[in-house]
Image (cartoon, rainbow, N blue to C red):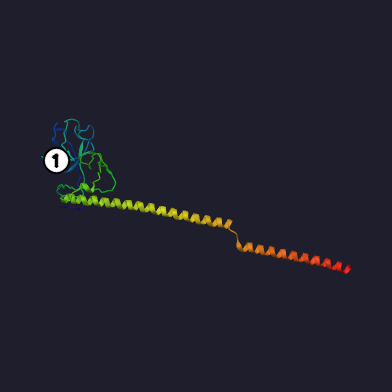
C-alpha cells in the first residue's frame, strides 16, 4: 500500500445525452470517468439538480460497467433512485482525495474501515459536522447510553471487553467524585482557618481594650501613695511650727 499521502482526485462531467432512467441503481454516463468501485464522489449540480441526487452530497461508486458508465449508492450503502429528470450538461462528479490509496499510478481504490469508541462518565451527544451525515448510521445524532456493570457478561470476548470499559468508566467517575470532594474539603478547611484567625484577632483586640495594664496602674498607685504621704508630712510639720510659737509666747 502506498502511504505517501498522494491525493487521488478527478472531476468528470455528466453526459446528459444518455440520462439515467427512473430506477434504483440506474447507470450514469460520464465519458472516461476513471472511477473504481468504492470510490467516494461528490455530485455538484450546475443548474437543475438531477432528480434523486443532492448537489454537494457525497456518494459511493457501487458498480462500474465500463469506462463511461457507473452506478451510485449512498455512503451508507443505501440504494439511490434517479427520477430521470433534471440535470445540466455542466454537472460534475468529483472523486475525493485519498491520503491512503492502493496505487496512485493505477488508481486502485482502498476502502478504509474502522471504529471510534468514545468513553465518558457523563452523557454526551455526537453530531456530525457535514450535511451528508457521514458519522452516523441512520440518525443525525448519536446519544450515549450508560452501561451498568450488572448489564455486562464475561462469557464472551466482546462482553469482557465491554465490562472492562464499563469498569474503567466507573473508576473515572469515582476519581472525579473524589476530586470534587477533595476540592470542597480544601475550601472548607481554608474557610475554617480564616474564621479561626478572625476569632483570635478579635479576642486580641478586645483584650487590648478591656484588660488593665498592671505595670502602668501599679506605677500610678505608688505615685498617689507617695503624694499622699508627703502631704500628710508637710501638714504635720506646719502644725508643729504653730505649736512651737505658742509655747514661746507663753
Q: Is residue 176 left or right of residue 65?
A: right
Identity of the residue drawn at 86% across and 66% down: 246
Is label 1 in a helix, a strand or a loop?
Answer: strand
Q: Give the residue pinned by disc 1.
A: 62
Q: Is residue 80 left or right of residue 122?
A: left
Identity of the residue drawn at 23% across and 49% down: 149
- The total number of labels drawn is 1
Q: Which sits in the foreground, 198 or 72?
A: 198
**Res 116 seen here:** no
Q: Position of residue 33 (x, y in %)?
A: 15, 41
Point out the image quarter for the C terminus: bottom right
Q: Which sits in the foreground, 102 or 241?
A: 241
Q: Position of residue 145 (x, y in %)?
A: 25, 44
When asked about the image quadrant of residue 49, the answer is: top left
Q: Residue furthest right?
A: 249
Q: Which sits in the foreground, 97 or 178?
A: 178
Relative to 72, does residue 217 appear above or below in the rendering?
below
Identity of the residue drawn at 87% across and 69% down: 248
Q: Position of residue 220 (x, y in %)?
A: 66, 62
Amino acid at each position: 500500500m502506498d502511504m505517501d499521502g498522494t491525493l487521488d482526485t478527478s472531476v468528470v462531467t455528466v453526459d446528459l445525452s444518455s440520462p439515467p432512467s427512473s430506477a434504483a441503481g440506474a447507470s450514469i454516463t460520464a465519458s472516461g470517468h476513471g472511477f473504481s468501485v468504492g470510490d467516494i464522489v461528490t455530485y455538484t449540480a450546475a443548474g437543475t439538480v438531477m432528480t434523486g441526487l443532492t448537489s454537494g452530497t457525497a456518494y459511493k461508486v457501487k458498480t462500474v460497467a465500463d469506462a463511461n458508465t457507473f452506478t451510485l449508492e449512498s455512503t451508507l450503502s443505501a440504494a439511490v433512485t434517479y427520477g430521470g429528470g433534471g440535470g445540466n450538461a455542466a454537472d460534475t462528479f468529483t472523486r475525493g482525495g485519498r491520503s491512503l490509496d492502493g496505487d496512485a499510478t493505477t488508481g486502485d481504490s482502498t476502502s478504509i474501515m474502522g471504529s471510534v469508541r468514545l468513553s465518558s462518565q457523563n452523557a454526551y451527544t455526537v453530531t456530525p459536522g457535514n450535511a451528508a451525515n457521514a458519522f452516523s448510521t441512520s440518525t443525525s445524532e448519536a446519544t450515549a447510553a450508560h452501561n451498568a456493570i450488572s448489564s455486562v457478561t464475561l462469557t464472551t470476548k466482546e462482553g469482557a471487553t465491554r465490562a472492562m470499559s464499563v469498569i474503567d468508566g466507573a473508576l473515572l467517575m469515582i476519581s472525579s467524585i473524589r476530586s470534587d470532594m477533595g476540592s470542597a474539603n480544601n475550601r472548607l478547611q481554608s474557610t475554617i482557618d480564616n474564621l479561626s484567625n478572625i476569632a483570635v484577632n478579635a479576642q486580641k483586640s478586645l483584650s487590648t481594650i478591656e484588660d488593665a495594664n498592671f505595670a502602668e496602674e501599679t506605677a500610678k498607685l505608688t505615685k498617689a501613695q507617695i503624694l499622699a504621704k508627703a502631704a500628710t508630712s508637710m501638714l504635720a510639720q506646719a502644725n508643729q511650727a504653730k505649736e512651737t510659737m505658742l509655747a514661746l509666747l507663753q
